Amino acid sequence: MSQPKIVAYLKPHCGWSQGVRAVLRKYQLPFEDRDIWNDPEQRFEMIQKSGQELSPCVEVDGKMLADISGEELETWMIQNKVVTKDNTPAGVPINAPCADHGAPVIVLKQ
């Protein structure tokens, strides 16, 4: 099975983002970890590609999965034969909210 190209638009401290990272690491999938919290350009790119502002967003071989938890990502990858189901625990909750959920959002002007 060839390795997919994965770009993950994540926050450094978000429970949902940590769940996405944990699932990708569980399956030993290399991925680009784009920090949308500290890099407004990455957040802007995520919004442009996904058509919405919620995170995490994960792009797998050009397919954008918007506002997705680690649990949802794992299910999608299994259903789309990106990975074969592995019952090994991910090590962290894969469907936990961000502690800062509801924090102000930075919006870039074009």
Image (cartoon, grey):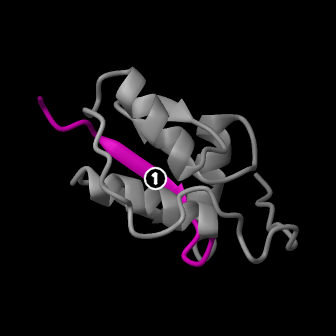
- Prevalent SS, magenta region: loop
Q: Is residue 3 within the magenta segment? A: yes
Confirm whether residue 49 shows in the render: yes
Residue placed under numbered mark 1 in the picture? 8
- Give residue 89's position: percent from left, percent from top: 37, 59
Quarter assignment of residue 85 = top left
Dot 1: within a 10 Å radius of its alpha carbon, few (fewer than 14), some, or many (20 or more) residues? many
- Give residue 90's position: percent from left, percent from top: 38, 61
Q: Name the image quarter holding the N terminus.
A: top left
**Element type at mark 1:** strand
Q: Please indicate whether residue 64 sits to the left or right of residue 62 in the image.
A: right
The number of numbered badges drawn on the structure is 1
- State the residue at coordinates (59%, 78%): 13
Q: Which residues are magenta?
A: 1-14
- State the residue at coordinates (83%, 66%): 105
- Give residue 59's position: percent from left, percent from top: 45, 39
- Between 26 and 59, the one lying in front of the other is 26
Task: Name above or below for residue 1 compared with residue 66.
Answer: above
- Give residue 98's position: percent from left, percent from top: 71, 69
- State the residue at coordinates (21%, 54%): 28
- Between 99 and 104, the one lying in front of the other is 99
Confirm whether residue 41 shows in the render: no
Q: Please indicate whether residue 53 sits to the left or right of residue 42 in the image.
A: right
The amino acid type of the residue labelled 1 equals Ala
Q: Please indicate whether residue 78 sits to the left or right of residue 39 in the image.
A: left
Q: Is residue 15 within the magenta segment? A: no
Quarter assignment of residue 47 = top right
Q: Residue furthest top?
A: 80
- Between 91 and 55, the one lying in front of the other is 91
